[in-house]
Amino acid sequence: MTATCSTLTHLSCSRCGEAYDAEQLMNLCPACEKPLLARYDLAQAAKTLTRESLQGREPSLWRYEEVLPVRTRAAQLKLGEGWTPLVCARPLGDDIGCPETLIKDESLNPTGSFKARGLVMAVGRALELGAVELAISSAGNAAGAMSAYAAKAGMPAHVYMPEDVPAAFRVECSNLGAEVTLVDGLITDCGARVRKKVEECGWFDVSTLKEPYRIEGKKTMGYEVVEQLGWRMPDVMIYPTGGGTGLVGMWKAFDEMEALGLIGSERPRMVSVQSNGCAPMVRAFEQGEQFAEAWEGAQTVADGLRVPAAVGDFLILEAVRESGGAAIAVSDEEMLYSARQMGRHTGVFPAPEGAATLAGQKRLLESGWLQDDETVVLFNTGSGLKYAHLWS
Ligand SMILES: *Cc1c(COP(=O)(O)O)cnc(C)c1O
């Protein structure tokens, strides 16, 4: 099997720091039940991963393969993930009074969302480490992405979804060959069903931050935005937060990029946007808590934001605080309105989660937290198409 240029060395716990061998299938840290993070030999990676060498590389997230965990070519389950456009949204920016607004349009990923970045890594690593069957609890895009990469890998996939999930999400998984189980309950109930089956049948759980590699795929958004800006750091990044893998991943990416000599010590202010029907991070941020209490009665049309308790809550809060950022909640109505506003001014049809970033940006401009001359990157994390029912 041909090897990639991965410089993965080991896994380390994000909480207790304990190191683990990366060549075994692992979920959370066995000692403290917190997420594990992948670590690399960055001095080695820096020899080949340079601003110059990147110029000739393939337009996908695999251009950063030195700092990705997949070790064998056969486990690079390529469907065209990553290197999505950073769209200049000047007319939108002019409309809201913040001209330097850009949209990282993640809807162009396979299966129409940025979940493809995470799942291509999780499934690829599961394949090379000998997992046989995969399972996930998800109310939306993660299940579709997992189903696609499991199909590409030839691995059986099991999806547990709440029974009220929109048809597009369900049909996507079943047409991609996954076994879909609809659960009468919430996403937390789906998670419990997956845990039971994992114990009984030896399936491997690729749910958010329950394995170390989804975050590695999501972090590439950080590498891409900075490279696409000509190695300039934007002032602010606005990220719709559910489990927070993207935000935590990008924050990790900036440290790696500094160690690689790709950037200096500059960082963007990281903004976490949630729905006011499920805003555990915003509440914890405002109350100065290190961990977020679970949100009761979570409700929002943005499926990706309906995460009452995130395993990596403390990592999200740390990144937002260290960056001098903010956490803000917006209403479903603001999301739906902002989606239309983004659509007609830019040609990007966002998922409600992506539209939430625009709603958050407008609030931050109004409050004076955001200045009108700052460069802002909004993450449109998915396509509005799977949510078309919300506007009809
Ligand atoms: C999953 C999802 C999110 C939230 O992503 P996290 O990394 O879990 O915070 C946001 N938007 C969309 C479209 C999603 O599918």
Image: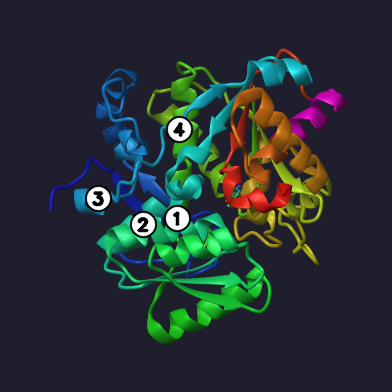
Numbered-mark total: 4
Check if residue 367 falls in the magenta segment: yes
Task: Indicate the position of residue 147 as horizontal and vertical percent values.
Answer: 41, 62
| 277 up-or-down from 54: above or below | below
Q: Mark 1 and 2 residues: CB-CB less than 8 Å, in contact?
A: yes
In the image, the segment drawn in magenta is 358-369
* Disc 2: which residue: 149
In front: label 2 or label 3: 2
For the point 25% across and 27% down, which residue is it? 47
Determine if the C-beta at disc 4 is less than 8 A from ligand 1: no
Return the mark for residue 84: 4
Q: Mark 2 and 4 residues: CB-CB less than 8 Å, in contact?
A: no
Left or right: residue 362 versus residue 143 is right
In front: label 4 or label 3: 4
* Disc 1: which residue: 145
Residue 350 picture quarter: top right
